[in-house]
Image: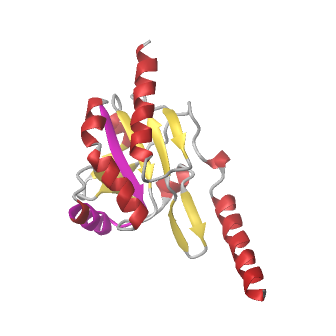
């Protein structure tokens, strides 16, 4: 009985920490300009959001390289790269992992889109996507769809890695059809 109470208290504390750290009011909202950034990719080259003005950008934050959910999500984005190209969209993944970790992850999993190292956690924080679990800080699983003018047009703060890429592609279909009208 005491063990159940302690587990329940622990769960409440962890949830409170997450809710306190990742608040909706700190996440950029639909219609706002996407915060600019420059981060280094797994290739060791700087990548700036402004480099993609004129293209659709799927900016996805994820917790950790080489973990089951993150690997599944990355595989699905990789599988769907031809569809993103048809939508004139680029996928950029961001986590607080190092350039080396991203390079190993891409090599091991056959990923050819850019993974960006937010080692100082600034961009994850600016996008309301930083989880602070005491001594461990990581990116939360959030995605932002950014239109060619640099505006955020879709925000996902509840992501199922199994179906997320398909969900984003459906949103791009909808958004691009609406933009053509």
Q: Quadrant of the C terminus?
A: top left
Q: Quadrant of residue 133?
A: bottom right
Task: Measuring from the top left, give residue 56's x and y in whole percent.
Answer: 37, 33
Residue in view at x 28 percent, y 65 percent: 105
Task: Measuring from the top left, give residue 13's x and y in whole percent.
Answer: 71, 72
Task: Measuring from the top left, give residue 80's x and y in whole percent.
Answer: 29, 43
Left or right: 107 as drawn, with respect to 101: left
User: How are the colours assigned in the image?
Assistant: secondary structure
Q: Residue furthest front?
A: 1
Q: Quadrant of the N terminus?
A: bottom right
Whether residue 51 is visible to the viewer of this picture, yes or no, is: no
Left or right: 112 as drawn, with respect to 120: left
Read off the magenta span. 88-107
Q: Is residue 22 above or below residue 171?
A: below
Q: Nearer the viewer, residue 169 or 37?
A: 169
Residue in view at x 32 percent, y 35 percent: 89
Q: Residue furthest top?
A: 181
User: Magenta stretch: residue 76 in it?
Assistant: no
Whether residue 52 is visible to the viewer of this picture, yes or no, is: yes
Residue in view at x 35 percent, y 68 percent: 66
Count of marks placed on residues: 0
Q: Nearer the viewer, residue 13 or 96?
A: 13
Left or right: 30 as drawn, with respect to 77: right
Task: Measuring from the top left, give residue 97's x and y in whole percent.
Answer: 39, 66
User: Magenta stretch: residue 95 in it?
Assistant: yes
Q: Residue furthest bottom?
A: 2
Residue in view at x 33 percent, y 31 percent: 55
Q: Is residue 107 above or below residue 86?
A: below
């Amino acid at each position: 009985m005491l063990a159940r109470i302690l587990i329940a208290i622990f769960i409440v504390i962890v949830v409170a920490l997450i809710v306190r750290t990742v608040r909706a009011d700190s996440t950029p909202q639909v219609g706002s300009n996407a915060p600019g950034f420059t981060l280094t990719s797994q290739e060791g080259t700087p990548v700036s959001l402004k480099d993609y003005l004129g293209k659709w950008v799927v900016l996805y934050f994820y917790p950790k390289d080489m973990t089951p959910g993150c690997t599944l999500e990355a595989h699905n984005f990789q599988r769907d790269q031809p569809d993103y190209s048809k939508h004139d969209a680029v996928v950029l993944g961001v986590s607080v992992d190092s350039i080396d970790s991203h390079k190993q992850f891409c090599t091991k999993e056959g990923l050819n889109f850019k993974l960006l190292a937010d080692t100082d956690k600034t961009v994850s924080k600016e996008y309301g996507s930083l989880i602070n679990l005491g001594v461990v800080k990581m990116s939360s699983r959030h995605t932002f769809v950014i239109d060619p003018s640099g505006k955020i047009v879709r925000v996902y703060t509840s992501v199922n890695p199994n179906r997320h890429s398909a969900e984003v592609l459906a949103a791009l279909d909808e958004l691009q059809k609406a933009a053509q009208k």
